[in-house]
């Protein structure tokens, strides 16, 4: 039934377009008739008719058929009509017959143009033999595909076949040896929460995301109900990285756990939107990512891919969307990775002094003026770089006092846990 409706609509459109074009081509041979027939001597028929009437009037007057007064009135009327016909003929464009070859060419262009449009749809652009797919059916198909998508193990196996992406440089042998010692220590004590957390992060640093995900899963299992949104979000992140960017059902479970604890967790929200896009639900993905873009600071780690992918998702969702101009991301005070790298060229004493000076300045400002979660996390990591565990613990305690009961505390907790000063 739907197919008949479609082809009926196609026929109606072709008729609406083609009939006026064909009429414009075919009517050219009727132009002369519309403007008046032409006599054999080239005089328009209406002019010849009035001239004949004028001549006949003179003959009838000479024969005495009509009276002179009546003949005068009739002559005036004939002459008036003759002038009107001559005036109309002079205003009209000369009638030119369209050559038959030109008429056939125009007719061919119109016919083949219309047939070509239909052929282009059938063989190139359209799918006329497929049944209609309503929106509800498409949504149901997307949900079914989501339910049937491969699991984490299958995705990791596929990654193993394709091979991991090449790294810029092999890891430092000394660092690799330390990680190996950490693996042995965790294997000997599988319930060591701090060891598992460190192992997960160091495996990720080496690009061993599958191993990092397994360690992080043990961290979440040991924490049980005390696991925070950041713990579940980190697990989802490692699972997705191990699967080459694919959000598996196992990663989805971790994401839902993170969002159940903290619906504002940025990492979990980003991956939730990615999951919807991979399932073909661009309408849901757009809503998740649009709100995340509005809620996130300019320097959030997911902002670059979010700004890159959101316009395409909006287009596929059928939404008119203009990406807002990026906000300026303020630089956090305190030592950055670039600062630390530059400090490697100094002597040990000078390097430690430089880092300590910047850390002290950051600590004083945060203590007196407060700061962002990112700055508190940086302060804790900086103390760990200086091997000043006591100061790192104090910074963690101060951060807990300032951010108690807020979702931002989980971000700081993750940094403190990474350096071993938080459970």
Image (spheres, rainbow, N blue to C red):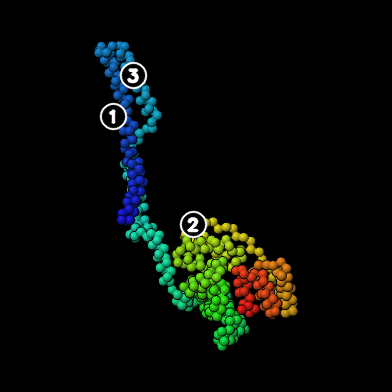
Identify the image quadrant of the C terminus. bottom right
Q: Residue at x 33, y 48 (%)?
A: 12
Dot 3 alpha-carbon crowd within 10 angstroms: few under 14, some 14 to 19, many 20 or more? some
**Image position of 246 (left or right of 18):** right
Residue 123 in the image, given as x and y percentages of width and height: 35, 58
Q: Where is mark 3, residue-wise? A: 77
Q: Residue at x 30, y 27 (%)?
A: 45
Residue 82 in the image, given as x and y percentages of width and height: 34, 22
**Image position of 266 (left or right of 336):** left
Comparing 366 with 199, the one in front is 366
| Element carrying mark 2 | loop
- Mark-to-mark CA distance, 1 and 3: 26 Å
Indicate which disc residue 26 carries: none
Up the image or down, 34 lies above or below 379; here it is above
- Mark-to-mark CA distance, 2 and 3: 72 Å
Dot 2 alpha-carbon crowd within 10 angstroms: few under 14, some 14 to 19, many 20 or more? some
Q: Where is mark 1, residue-wise? A: 40
Q: Is residue 172 visible?
A: yes
Indicate which disc residue 319 carries: 2
Asked if labels 2 and 1 touch by Cβ distance under 8 angstroms, the answer is: no
| Element carrying mark 1 | loop
């Amino acid at each position: 039934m739907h197919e008949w409706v479609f082809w009926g609509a196609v026929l109606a459109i072709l008729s609406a377009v083609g009939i006026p074009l064909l009429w414009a081509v075919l009517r050219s041979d009727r132009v002369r008739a519309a403007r008046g027939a032409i006599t054999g001597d080239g005089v328009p028929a209406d002019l010849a008719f009035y001239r004949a009437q004028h001549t006949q009037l003179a003959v009838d007057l000479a024969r005495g058929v009509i009276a002179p007064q009546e003949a005068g009135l009739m002559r005036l009327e004939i002459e008036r009509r003759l002038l009107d016909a001559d005036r109309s003929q002079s205003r009209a464009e000369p009638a030119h017959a369209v050559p038959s070859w030109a008429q056939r060419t125009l007719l061919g262009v119109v016919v083949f143009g219309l047939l070509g449009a239909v052929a282009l749809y059938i063989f190139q652009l359209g799918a006329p033999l497929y049944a209609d797919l309503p929106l509800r059916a498409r949504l149901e198909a997307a949900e079914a595909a989501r339910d049937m998508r491969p699991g984490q193990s299958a995705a990791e196996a596929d990654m193993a076949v394709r091979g991991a992406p090449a790294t810029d440089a092999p890891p430092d042998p000394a660092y690799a040896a330390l990680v190996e010692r950490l693996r042995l220590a965790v294997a000997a004590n599988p319930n060591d929460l701090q060891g598992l957390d460190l192992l997960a992060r160091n495996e990720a640093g080496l690009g061993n995301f599958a191993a990092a995900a397994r360690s992080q899963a043990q961290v979440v299992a040991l924490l049980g109900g005390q696991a925070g949104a950041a713990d579940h979000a980190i697990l989802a992140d490692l699972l997705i990285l191990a699967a080459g960017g694919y959000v598996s059902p196992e990663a989805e479970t971790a994401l839902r756990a993170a969002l159940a604890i903290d619906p504002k967790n940025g990492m979990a929200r980003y991956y939730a939107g990615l999951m919807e896009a991979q399932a073909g639900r661009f309408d849901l993905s757009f809503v998740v990512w649009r709100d995340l873009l509005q809620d996130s600071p300019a320097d959030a780690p997911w902002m670059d891919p979010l700004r890159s992918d959101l316009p395409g998702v909006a287009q596929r969702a059928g939404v008119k969307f203009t990406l807002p101009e990026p906000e300026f991301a303020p630089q956090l005070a305190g030592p950055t990775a670039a600062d630390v790298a530059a400090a490697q060229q100094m002597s040990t004493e000078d390097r430690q002094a430089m880092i300590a000076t910047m850390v002290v300045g950051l600590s004083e400002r945060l203590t007196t003026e407060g700061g962002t979660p990112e700055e508190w996390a940086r302060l804790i990591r900086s103390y760990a770089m200086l091997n000043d565990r006591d100061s790192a613990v104090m910074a963690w305690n101060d951060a807990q006092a300032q951010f108690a009961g807020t979702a931002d505390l989980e971000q700081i907790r993750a940094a403190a846990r990474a350096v071993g000063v938080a459970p």
